[in-house]
C-alpha cells in the first residue's frame, strides 16, 4: 500500500481526499494494523492512485488469504504479463524471425520448439518473437526461464511471480494447471519456456493446458528436440558465414569487395571486437581476420562473444591462431557462464555425451572429413548404408552439431561438423573408419 501510494506521488491526506477513505484507515493499512480490507475499499484506493492492472493485482494479492487466480483473472493482460525487453539488437536472424512469428500467428500451430546447440541464440530469437507479438498484437507473454531455480516462497505474492510459478510447475509436471487455466482461459496468450531441457518432451499437464486454453500458444527453446505429436520443430543453426576466400591464382577482388562486414556473423563479431578493442579500426585487414575467426568458431554467437573478450590478452592474429588450432580454449570466460556456472565448453561436451553410441561414433567419423561432404559421399567414405547415414545426419543437424552449408547450385546439400565439437567427438568416439562396422548392421 505504501509503495503504491509513493509510486502515485501523493500523501496520505491527498489519497484520502481523492478516494473518500479516511486518513486513519489508510494509515492503518500501511502500518499493517488492518490486514483484511474490504474489496470496495481497495477499489477506491486503486482508482484514486490510478493503478494499472499489474499494480492493482499486486495490491489485492497483498491481502492475506487473497485467492491469486481470482485476483489475476480480471487483471490478466499485456501489463500483467509483459514481454522481456532484449538488451541488444538482434543481428542476422531476419528470416528465422519471420518464420517463427509467422507460425505463431496461425491458428493451427500452438506448440513450437526452437532447437539448437548451446550458444546459438535460441533465447534471443524467442525474445524478439515474443516482443513482436506483445507490442504488435498486445498479447500477454508468460516468460519462464526454466534453467533457473524456482523462486522462494517469499516472492509468491507478486502477480508476475505467481503466474510464472504456475507455468513453471505445469511445465515440469507439477501442480498449478487449474489456477493457470482459470486465468488464461479463452484469451490469446504466449507461454515461453526458455531452456526447457529438464524433461525429454512436454508433460501431459502442459498439453492439457493447451487443450483447455484454446488461444494459448507455447514456445519452447531447448538443446534437444522434443518428440511430441503436434510439436513443430524449428532448428536454429549458427549465423551464416562469409564465403571462403579465393584460392591462390584466382582473380583479385574488386576494391572493397574483400570486406565481409555485411555478413551477419562478421557484423556481430566486429561489434564484440569494437567493444573490447576500440583501437582496432575495421580496416580491410582487420575485417579479413575477423571473418576467419568467425569461420573457425562456426558463427556461434556466444562463442564469438567469449572469444572477443580474450582480445584483452591476445592480439587479433593470435586469436585467429588459437581459434583454428583449439577453438574451445576461447569459448569460456567468467562473464558468460550460465546460471549453473557452466561454460559453453561444458555445454557442448554435454551435447556430445547425450548422443547414443551410434551417433557419437558417426559424428567422430564425419568430423574427420573435409567440410562440404554430401550424405552420399559420407556414406561411401565411412562405409555406412545410405539410409542409415541420412537418418543420423538428419538427427545431428537437428541438434546443431552438424550444419548445412550454403548450396552452390541445384546439387545435393552439403554439410560440415562444427569446429567447436570436432575434438569432443573425436575424444569420445575416435575417427578411424574401421569403427563404423557396427553401423552396417
Image (cartoon, rainbow, N blue to C red):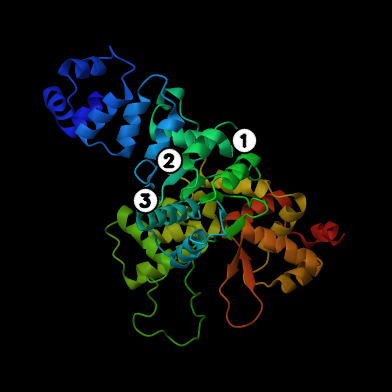
Identify the residue shown where x is 64% and y is 74%.
413
Q: CA distance from mark 1 to mark 2?
A: 34 Å
Q: Position of residue 96 (x, y in %)?
A: 49, 64
Residue 361 as seen in the image, left or right of residue 123: right
Q: Nearest the camera: 63 or 222? A: 63
Is residue 172 rendered to the left or right of residue 260? Answer: right
Q: Residue at point 66% right, 77% down? A: 412
Give the left or right position of residue 372, taking residue 182 as reference: right
Q: Position of residue 197 (x, y in %)?
A: 59, 43
In the picture, the quarter occupied by the N terminus is: top left
The label on residue 148 is none
How many numbered marks, from 0 up?
Answer: 3
Q: Secondary structure at mark 2?
A: loop
Depth check, mark 3 against mark 1: the one in front is: 1
Kindly identify which residue carries mark 3.
Answer: 86
Question: Callout 2: few (<14), some (14-19), or many (20+) C-alpha neighbours within 10 Å?
Answer: few
Mark 3 and mark 2: span between their CA atoms?
22 Å
* Relative image position of residue 288 (x, y in whole percent): 40, 70
In the rendered image of this protein, does residue 114 appear above or below residue 62?
Answer: below
Residue 332 rendering spot, x and y as whole percentages:
48, 46
- The extreme right residue here reads 441
Which callout, 1 or 2, points to the residue nearer the camera? 1
Residue 223 higher or lower than 181, as above or below: below
Q: Furthest-top residue in view?
A: 33
Few, some or many C-alpha atoms within 10 Å of disc 3 (few <14, some 14-19, many ≥20)?
few
Q: Secondary structure at mark 1?
A: loop
Secondary structure under the numbered disc 3 in the rendered image: loop
| Among numbered discs 3 and 2, the one appearing first in the sequence | 3
> Label for residue 334?
2
Amino acid at each position: 500500500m505504501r509503495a503504491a501510494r509513493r509510486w502515485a506521488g501523493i500523501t496520505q491526506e491527498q489519497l484520502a481526499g481523492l478516494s473518500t477513505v479516511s486518513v486513519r484507515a489508510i494509515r492503518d493499512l500501511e502500518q499493517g494494523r488492518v490486514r483484511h480490507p474490504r474489496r470496495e475499499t481497495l477499489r477506491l484506493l486503486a482508482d484514486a492512485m490510478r493503478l494499472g492492472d499489474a499494480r492493482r493485482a499486486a495490491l489485492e494479492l497483498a491481502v492475506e488469504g487473497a485467492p491469486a487466480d481470482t485476483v489475476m483473472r480480471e487483471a490478466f493482460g499485456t501489463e500483467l504479463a509483459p514481454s522481456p525487453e532484449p538488451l541488444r539488437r538482434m543481428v542476422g536472424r531476419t528470416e528465422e524471425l519471420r518464420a517463427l512469428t509467422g507460425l505463431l500467428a496461425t491458428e493451427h500451430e500452438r506448440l513450437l520448439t526452437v532447437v539448437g546447440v548451446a550458444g546459438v541464440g535460441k533465447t534471443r530469437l524467442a525474445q524478439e518473437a515474443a516482443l513482436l507479438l506483445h507490442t504488435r498484437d498486445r498479447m500477454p507473454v508468460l516468460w519462464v526461464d526454466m534453467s533457473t531455480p524456482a523462486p522462494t516462497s517469499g516472492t509468491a505474492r507478486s502477480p508476475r511471480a505467481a503466474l510464472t510459478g504456475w507455468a513453471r510447475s505445469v511445465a515440469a509436471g507439477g501442480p498449478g494447471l487449474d489456477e493457470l487455466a482459470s486465468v488464461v482461459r479463452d484469451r490469446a496468450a504466449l507461454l515461453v519456456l526458455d531452456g526447457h531441457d529438464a524433461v525429454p518432451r512436454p508433460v501431459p499437464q502442459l498439453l492439457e493446458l493447451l487443450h483447455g486454453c484454446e488461444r494459448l500458444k507455447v514456445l519452447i527453446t531447448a538443446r534437444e528436440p522434443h518428440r511430441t505429436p503436434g510439436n513443430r520443430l524449428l532448428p536454429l543453426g549458427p549465423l551464416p558465414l562469409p564465403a571462403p576466400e579465393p584460392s591462390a591464382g584466382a582473380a583479385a577482388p574488386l576494391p572493397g569487395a574483400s570486406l565481409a562486414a555485411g555478413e551477419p556473423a562478421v557484423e556481430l563479431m566486429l561489434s564484440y571486437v569494437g567493444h573490447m578493442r576500440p583501437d582496432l579500426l575495421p580496416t580491410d585487414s582487420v575485417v579479413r581476420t575477423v571473418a576467419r575467426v568467425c569461420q573457425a568458431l562456426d558463427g556461434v554467437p556466444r562463442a564469438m562473444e567469449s572469444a572477443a573478450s580474450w582480445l584483452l590478452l591476445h592480439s587479433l592474429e593470435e586469436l585467429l591462431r588459437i581459434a583454428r588450432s583449439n577453438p574451445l580454449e576461447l569459448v569460456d570466460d567468467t562473464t558468460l557462464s550460465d546460471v549453473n556456472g557452466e561454460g559453453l565448453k561444458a555445454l557442448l561436451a554435454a551435447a556430445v555425451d547425450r548422443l547414443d553410441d551410434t551417433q557419437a561414433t558417426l559424428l567422430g567419423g564425419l568430423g574427420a572429413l573435409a567440410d562440404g561432404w554430401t550424405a552420399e559421399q559420407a556414406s561411401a567414405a565411412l562405409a555406412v548404408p545410405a539410409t542409415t547415414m541420412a537418418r543420423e545426419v538428419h538427427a545431428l543437424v537437428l541438434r546443431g552439431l552438424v550444419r548445412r552449408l550454403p548450396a552452390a547450385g541445384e546439387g545435393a546439400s552439403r554439410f560440415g561438423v562444427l569446429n567447436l565439437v570436432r575434438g569432443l567427438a573425436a575424444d569420445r568416439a575416435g575417427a578411424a573408419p574401421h569403427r563404423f562396422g557396427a553401423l552396417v548392421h
